[in-house]
Amino acid sequence: MPPRPPSGVIVSRCEFVLIAIALVALPASTAADEPPAAKAASPDSLAAIVLARNCLECHNASDRKGGLNLASRAAALSGGDSGPALKPGDPAGSLLVERILAGEMPPKERTKLTDANHDLLRDWIKRGAKWDVDPIDPFMYTTERRAGCDWWSLQPLRPSEPPPVKDSAWLKNAIDNFILQRLERADLRPSPEADRRTLIRRLSFDLLGLPPTPEYVDAFVNDREPRAYERLVDRLLDSPHYGERWARHWFDIVRYAESQGFERNKLRPSAWKYRDFVVEAANSDLPYDDFIRWQIAGDVLRPDDPLAVIASGFLALGPYDLTAYNNGTADMRAFAREEELEGLVGTVCQTFLGLTVNCSRCHDHKFDPITQKEYYQISAALGGTYQGAERESLTEPGRSAAESRVAAISAEQSALAEQEKGATPQQAREIASRRSRLECVSRLLNGGPAHVTVPRQPEAWRVMSRGDYRQPGEVVSPRGMACVAGLSPEWGLAENSPEADRRKALAEWIACSTNPLAPRVIVNRLWADHFGEGLVRTRSDFGFQGGQPSHPELLDWLAGQLVHPGEGRAGSLKRIQRLIVTSAAYRQSSRAVAASAKIDADNRLIWRRPKQRLDAETFRDAILAVSGDLDLRLGGPGYRDFKVSSMGDNETYSVFDAVGPEFNRRSLYRTCVRSGTSPLLDALDCPDPNVATPRRSATTTPLQALTLLNDVFIEHYAARFAERLEREAPAGRSAQIRRAFALALMRAPSDEEASSGEKFVAEHGLAQYGVVLFNTNEFMFIE
């Protein structure tokens, strides 16, 4: 592989790619077949693209099949085992043309060049076979087998105006223009709007992860104000429980857990503070660029702010091999360290950039334009972060600022107490939630130890041959990747730069407003949270192995709204979520239409809102809520549904059936250890915290049926549900059935359902009726 051009060439490289946009914009499978027809591109530029996409994979500086390297003019003229590949001015006498016309090259398993490409190469050779860029960088261009620097996700954002549509009456906001345009092109019609009971249930689960109360449902159904829906959205986004829901999505991605893993698997007593930071960041709508910066370098950028210091605990979330570090040989410690750093690089880059940079540890990336050297450049930025200790989240200068903020919180709590006098039950619940949030923030500001990284000055950082720590190579400085258009890889740091400067530079590079990846990745995650699928299906991989966006213009428009909103604050994730859930696309019914399914069976064009099964934690929380036992306190140390046993330095966790008041908090507050799994949550595909899970599975297995009918948790809270029904509907079975439907399913039963329910209760009791309701598809799925 020839060396990549120096950093000063990056701008001209991007310009060159844009010149050939008519060819570059084609999918890899098409680009090899279609003639390069960009009018603005020079023939030399287009010839370089044809060579890069069809020849350089086998004929480059590091892999010279047949002894031939076509990356540079001099090498091509020197030729390979069969002689010179080119004779400038003589296409007929050039071996390259001869082999291509004979069908020998590209090889049989590769797509052959078109006649138009043949003509282009012949004309290029006839004019002297001049290289537009010499040497040609194989990483520059996308081929059938790998992405180049021209890959769609690496290009600058291209926000466009919402396109015109025929049926403008359907539109609610600009999102719908992009959706409806594609539907109209495919001769598809959007589904009707869902009814109000469906919409409030959908919104409540999507934004809070909790079911709405019957009182909230009835109030919304009967609210005839034109903006009733928008007011409901605003109320839910302002709820303190919004942050809990969004945090649960985030923790799947970042491997959040409260123990170290491996053999020792020791608890991390203060890891919950990172959890509470994420909840508070979501509730306060911390700008996304700051959310990135704080997690990578909050202790450097804002050392006097306990929330920013706690946020840097993101770097210490992964598993930690205490045995190797404390009892292993030097080789074991070195190996464990390289494994830990690979996991950290992977988490940082997949979470924020949607790139599998960690796949370049041992060699250049097989599918994306990322070199092994660039992996170690990113690793050098993180190489001074170490796990294994907890430290104070407050510095001495930060204590007075924190005390002032705590005093302000106390004053606000007093004001809430006044508001609570004479409040309606609904208002009282909202005031209690706000008070709980203030208490949560106060706990974080009051200091104490936090599970964060312990920075050290790293030694000289080297590229390891084949990723082997025993084969150190050249020294590298902290630096970014050259493949991202509009984002310079140069950070201006020397090989021995201070640890703090390294992480600060990485944080600023990722959060930079010209970085197209970070906003694309996060708005795609938000879309997936509400539609079950992202506009790009592979939520943490925007590279060649990932998916293409179903609506590229919409993706870039949403990303542009995040970075440059025009109105409001940049970086507001709540604003993007509000746009999504107030769109007509989101409000569609989930009912399948046979005619539409024939055209678009996977619903990639979004002609309906897909059904989604409740995730494991939301299912558990919903049962607690309808039983009347859910404890809505926010933050603080979580509950433990396990017993800890120590054998020497090792800790093991024995899970027990966690029922009773002390376990009635939301599942987010379950102390999450890396080996203490919950049978109920596992049956519903709760992910393994040892690995990042950008998209949860939604399986259907016999074990689920057995668990949901027989688990102690289900039986206990079905009994508590029955007690609630008897308490709130003392008039008899008919009233209890109606109340059960209102609480669990947010609607009234039909006559047939009421009649069969009464018969079932008479024979089996209210508690078993609760078990039946908890197992219905209507309870388990979001319409």
Image (cartoon, rainbow, N blue to C red):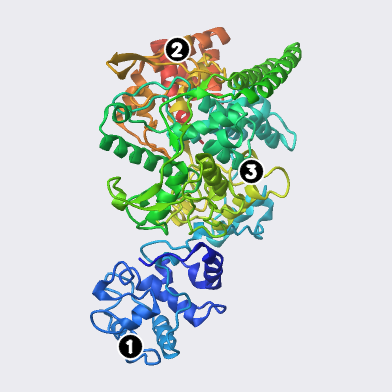
Q: Foreground residue, 106 or 322?
A: 322
- Badge number at residue 94: 1
Check disc 2 and give the amino acid type: Leu
Mark 3 or mark 2, whichever is nearer to me: 3
Cα–Cα gap, marks 2 and 1: 87 Å
x 72%, y 50%: residue: 566
Q: Secondary structure at mark 1?
A: loop
Closer mark to the observer between disc 2 and disc 1: 1
Q: CA distance from mark 1 to mark 3?
A: 56 Å
Q: Which residue is mark 2?
A: 766
Image position of 560 with respect to 671: above or below: below
Give the crowd class for mark 3: few <14, some 14-19, many >=20 residues within 10 Å. Answer: many
The correct choice, above or below, for 98 with respect to 160 in the image is below
Residue 242 visible in the current orientation:
no
Give 310 or 689, whichever is nearer the viewer.
310
User: For mark 3, what is the residue?
Assistant: 571
Q: Secondary structure at mark 3?
A: loop
Q: Which mark is residue 506?
A: none
Residue placed at 30% from the left, 75% from the top?
Answer: 106
Of the two numbered discs 2 and 1 on the same chain, state the one appearing first in sequence: 1
